[in-house]
Image: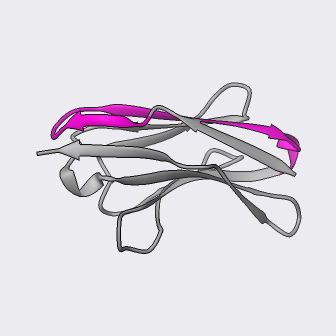
Amino acid sequence: QVQLVESGGGLVQAGGSLRLSCVASGSIFSINAMGWYRQAPGKQRELVATVTSAGWTNYADSVKGRFTISRGNAKNTVYLQMGSLKPEDTAVYYCNAAYGSSRVDSWGQGTQVTVSS
Protein backbone atom coordinates (compact mmCIF):
# COMPACT_ATOMS: atom_id res chain seq x y z
CA GLN A 1 0.00 0.00 0.00
CA VAL A 2 0.92 3.64 -0.47
CA GLN A 3 0.04 6.44 1.91
CA LEU A 4 0.08 10.11 0.88
CA VAL A 5 0.32 13.30 2.91
CA GLU A 6 -0.16 16.71 1.31
CA SER A 7 0.89 20.13 2.55
CA GLY A 8 1.18 23.68 1.29
CA GLY A 9 -2.36 24.84 0.72
CA GLY A 10 -3.66 28.17 1.90
CA LEU A 11 -5.17 31.52 0.99
CA VAL A 12 -3.59 33.62 -1.73
CA GLN A 13 -4.60 36.62 -3.79
CA ALA A 14 -5.28 36.32 -7.50
CA GLY A 15 -2.04 36.42 -9.43
CA GLY A 16 -0.09 34.89 -6.57
CA SER A 17 1.75 31.60 -6.22
CA LEU A 18 1.64 28.52 -4.00
CA ARG A 19 3.55 25.27 -3.90
CA LEU A 20 1.91 22.04 -2.85
CA SER A 21 3.91 19.06 -1.64
CA CYS A 22 2.97 15.42 -1.30
CA VAL A 23 5.06 12.75 0.39
CA ALA A 24 4.41 9.07 -0.24
CA SER A 25 5.25 6.26 2.17
CA GLY A 26 4.82 2.50 2.11
CA SER A 27 5.37 0.64 -1.17
CA ILE A 28 6.89 3.63 -2.93
CA PHE A 29 8.90 1.52 -5.37
CA SER A 30 5.66 0.25 -6.88
CA ILE A 31 4.44 3.75 -7.78
CA ASN A 32 3.87 4.18 -11.52
CA ALA A 33 2.71 7.77 -11.52
CA MET A 34 1.80 10.57 -9.15
CA GLY A 35 -0.40 13.53 -9.67
CA TRP A 36 -2.70 16.22 -8.42
CA TYR A 37 -6.46 16.45 -8.75
CA ARG A 38 -8.83 19.08 -7.44
CA GLN A 39 -12.46 19.36 -6.47
CA ALA A 40 -14.33 22.62 -6.22
CA PRO A 41 -17.64 22.89 -4.32
CA GLY A 42 -20.45 21.37 -6.32
CA LYS A 43 -18.12 20.02 -8.99
CA GLN A 44 -16.57 16.69 -9.80
CA ARG A 45 -12.96 15.94 -9.01
CA GLU A 46 -10.76 16.77 -12.00
CA LEU A 47 -7.22 16.10 -13.08
CA VAL A 48 -4.75 18.95 -12.64
CA ALA A 49 -1.41 17.36 -13.54
CA THR A 50 0.36 14.01 -13.48
CA VAL A 51 3.94 12.79 -13.77
CA THR A 52 5.02 9.23 -14.49
CA SER A 53 7.99 7.41 -13.01
CA ALA A 54 9.74 8.05 -16.34
CA GLY A 55 9.15 11.77 -15.98
CA TRP A 56 6.36 12.25 -18.51
CA THR A 57 3.98 15.00 -17.51
CA ASN A 58 0.38 15.79 -18.38
CA TYR A 59 -1.60 18.91 -17.56
CA ALA A 60 -5.20 20.03 -17.70
CA ASP A 61 -5.65 22.71 -20.35
CA SER A 62 -6.84 25.14 -17.69
CA VAL A 63 -3.49 25.10 -15.89
CA LYS A 64 -0.99 24.75 -18.74
CA GLY A 65 1.64 27.45 -18.60
CA ARG A 66 0.73 28.35 -15.00
CA PHE A 67 1.33 25.14 -13.01
CA THR A 68 4.35 22.86 -12.96
CA ILE A 69 4.44 19.34 -11.55
CA SER A 70 7.72 17.76 -10.50
CA ARG A 71 9.06 14.87 -8.45
CA GLY A 72 11.71 15.04 -5.79
CA ASN A 73 15.05 13.27 -6.08
CA ALA A 74 13.87 10.53 -3.76
CA LYS A 75 10.94 9.85 -6.13
CA ASN A 76 8.50 9.61 -3.22
CA THR A 77 7.65 13.29 -3.28
CA VAL A 78 5.66 15.25 -5.83
CA TYR A 79 5.28 19.00 -6.01
CA LEU A 80 2.81 21.30 -7.72
CA GLN A 81 4.10 24.81 -8.28
CA MET A 82 1.11 27.01 -8.98
CA GLY A 83 1.48 30.48 -10.45
CA SER A 84 -0.79 33.21 -11.81
CA LEU A 85 -3.52 31.81 -9.62
CA LYS A 86 -7.12 32.63 -10.42
CA PRO A 87 -10.25 32.52 -8.23
CA GLU A 88 -11.43 29.57 -10.31
CA ASP A 89 -8.42 27.59 -9.05
CA THR A 90 -10.05 27.53 -5.63
CA ALA A 91 -10.60 23.91 -4.63
CA VAL A 92 -9.45 21.08 -2.43
CA TYR A 93 -6.34 19.64 -4.03
CA TYR A 94 -5.71 15.92 -3.70
CA CYS A 95 -2.48 14.05 -4.25
CA ASN A 96 -2.78 10.76 -6.12
CA ALA A 97 -0.46 7.83 -6.65
CA ALA A 98 -1.09 4.94 -9.02
CA TYR A 99 0.86 1.88 -7.95
CA GLY A 100 1.30 -1.80 -8.60
CA SER A 101 0.63 -3.90 -11.69
CA SER A 102 -3.09 -3.24 -11.32
CA ARG A 103 -2.51 0.53 -11.00
CA VAL A 104 -4.35 0.88 -7.72
CA ASP A 105 -5.13 4.46 -6.76
CA SER A 106 -4.15 5.97 -3.44
CA TRP A 107 -5.35 9.41 -2.34
CA GLY A 108 -4.20 11.95 0.18
CA GLN A 109 -6.55 13.71 2.56
CA GLY A 110 -6.62 16.90 0.49
CA THR A 111 -5.42 20.43 1.06
CA GLN A 112 -7.51 23.57 0.59
CA VAL A 113 -6.39 26.23 -1.87
CA THR A 114 -8.36 29.46 -1.85
CA VAL A 115 -7.66 32.26 -4.33
CA SER A 116 -9.25 35.61 -3.53
CA SER A 117 -10.08 38.16 -6.19
**Going by the image, does 25 lie left or right of 109?**
right
Task: Give the x, y percent position of residue 42.
Answer: 35, 73
Residue 8 vertical placement versus 111 (above, below) = above
Q: Which residues are magenta?
A: 9-30
Identify which residue, 64 or 115, lies in the foreground: 115
Q: Is residue 34 magenta?
A: no
Identify which residue, 47 or 40, lies in the foreground: 40
Q: Quadrant of residue 106?
A: bottom right
Residue appearing at x 32%, y 54% in the figure: 63
Task: Give the x, y percent position of residue 88.
Answer: 23, 58
Q: Quadrant of residue 44?
A: bottom left
Q: Is residue 46 visible?
A: yes
**Going by the image, does 33 lie left or right of 61?**
right
Q: Quadrant of residue 68?
A: top left
Q: Is residue 57 visible?
A: no
Task: Give the x, y percent position of residue 20.
Answer: 47, 35
Residue at the outermost top position: 73
